[in-house]
Amino acid sequence: MDVALERLPNAVAKVSVTIEPSDFSQAVDRAFKSVVGRYNIPGFRRGKAPRKIFERYVGRGVLLQEAAQQLVDRHYRDALQQASVDPVGEPQINIVALDEDKPFQFDIEVESKPVIEVGSLDDLLGEPLTIPDATEEDFSHELDKLARTQAQLVPVEDDPVSMGDHVILKLKGYLADNEDDSEDSEPFVEDDEYGVEIGSGMAVEGLETQLIGLKLGEPQKIRLTYPESHPDVALQGQEVIFDVTVTDIKRPDVPAVDDDLATALGWENEKEMREAVEERVRDRLKQQARGVRESAILGKLKERLSFDLPSELVKRALHNQLHELENMLRQMGVSVDDYLESREMSVDQLHEDMRPQAEERVKEELILEAVARENGFTVTNEELVDSVRPMAEAYRQPLEQMIAVLQQHGDWDVIKTSLLISKASDFLASAQPPQEDEQG
């Protein structure tokens, strides 16, 4: 089998495959044995007609087509592997030559991951890894968070909403453009039991702070602007108005940071708890610094490298973003259809709004794969199994059964790629350039 590769625009690989005449002749023989039983030939039992008689009644073309299909099925994956093509979409097979006693030729056109040559990273690995020192304030804040996990919520009736309170709202949200006719406008969000923890940062930026000072049953209009980084792209940068009424306030009764809290959380005493918390804070600051460094290096790599993005990978990234949006809307009690209707937006328009972010995600993952490949990173079978073990435990399935399911659905390679990307990410986050030998 001879294989030739041509890279086409839009991340499409064209692999031309040539099979020797002798191999094609053997394939035709196998094809006859495969198809002869499908036809009734006068004067013969099904499957017992001689080949010449079969070809006279049915035609040799049936055998040639069957042989071609069998050869494509047999050599498709080997041809892609030989051409170093990593497919990501459905292939298009074109039969080029299907003549007896001549080489059999077919082309495979398929979207594939682009060939990316990252090259030396020595100049980029000089990006500083600046880890800030942990402060006593950092430790106290973390200890306070731990104490709050053991707090009991106590109803509040007379006091206004304050930082740390858990409140229930009757809430409706409108775009500011619809303020004058809000009575007739369809709200983009409506919830009679919208829960907010003041200071948690879980609600849209600006909402929690404007609730401080409100009292039970006191209606209020809150105006704010959604941040440009909000996951719902249709609301990014939009000015909105919320009609809110506080219907319930509960305030956490936070226990003291002492031995009792430590034992309740599984430590021997307060000293042991403080030591663990300090280590946790330092680890978090280190991970944040690593993330900043990785983002800086990736940003420079994206400027340096140019390549086509496979549309299939962008579609998958879009699907993941839509799934994240659905989850967010579900928590707000809103369906995707209602959301699109209130935005006067089609699914296609939503896709186009999300596309730039999806493309950036795909670009970064492809670059990280290339970094992993050029630096010789590998994933062992033991690492793969260890990564799947928590999933098997969560679904209460035997580990072997979970692995078999993942392999059957093609997710095994996806997990392997994800682990490679993670290794490349760690490398960019922490690796330092090699030092030149200092010889006198």
Image (spheres, rainbow, N blue to C red):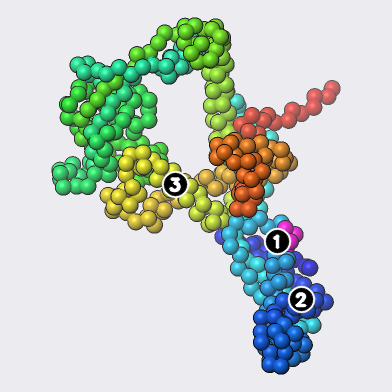
Q: Nearer the viewer, residue 69 or 286?
A: 69
- Residue at point 70% right, 69% down? 72
- Residue at point 25% right, 40% down? 190
Q: Quadrant of residue 78?
A: bottom right
The quadrant in which the N terminus is found is: bottom right
Between disc 3 and disc 2, whose residue precedes?
A: 2
- Residue at point 39% right, 40% down? 328
Circle 1 sits in a helix, a strand or a loop, which is it?
helix
Between disc 2 and disc 1, whose residue precedes?
A: 2
Residue 167 in the magenta stretch? The answer is no
Magenta stretch: give its range. 77-82
Q: Amino acid at mark 3?
A: His
Q: Residues within 10 Å of mark 1 (few under 14, many from 20)?
A: some
Marks 3, 2: nearer the viewer: 2
- Residue at point 51% right, 52% down? 316
| Image side of residue 253 versus residue 271, left or right | left
Q: Which residue is mark 1?
A: 77
